[in-house]
Image: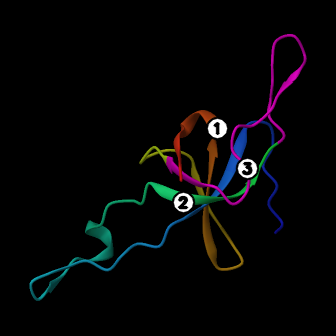
Amino acid sequence: MAIKPLADRVLIEAAPEKEEKIGNIFIPDTAKEKPTVGVVVAAGPGKVADDGKTVPMQVKAGQKVLYGKYSGTEIKDGGKEYLIVRESDILAIVE
């Protein structure tokens, strides 16, 4: 992996979308909603507080998370699509 998040940013691999079919009609990719669940691939060291101390991250690699629908920046690396979001954009850890 050539991507290492900085500060309070998290690299997420979005969960694969399920192919939707209503009756005999397939829903095209452009009409599907963006996924909001993914797996944390890497996390930065944490945010630096006003007093100079680093606040550690609450998420770590391998955890399944729920994030905001329109959060982050989409990137591609090695044929895979990832999302870089701030830790504050992560809504919950899914267990």
In the image, farthest residue toward the right: 52
Q: Earlier in the sequence, mark 1 or mark 3?
A: 3
**Where residue 51 sits in the image (x, y, percent)?**
87, 10
Query: Where is residue 70 shown, x and y percent of the image?
Result: 44, 46
Q: Considering the numbered disc 2 on the image, is that residue within a helix, a strand or a loop?
A: strand
**In the displayed structure, would residue 94 be above or below residue 13?**
above
Q: Residues within 10 Å of mark 2 (few under 14, many from 20)?
A: many
Type of amino acid at the residue the image marks with label 2: Gly
- First in sequence: mark 1 or mark 2? 2
> Label 1, label 3: how many angstroms apart (C-alpha)?
11 Å
Q: Which residue carries the number 3 mark?
A: 60
The type of colouring in the image is rainbow
CA gap between label 2 and label 3 equals 12 Å
Q: Hey, what amino acid is under mark 3?
A: Lys
Q: Which residues are magenta?
A: 45-66
Task: Please give the residue where the numbered disc 1 appears in the rendered image.
Answer: 87
Q: Which residue is mark 2?
A: 38
Identify the disc placed on residue 56. none
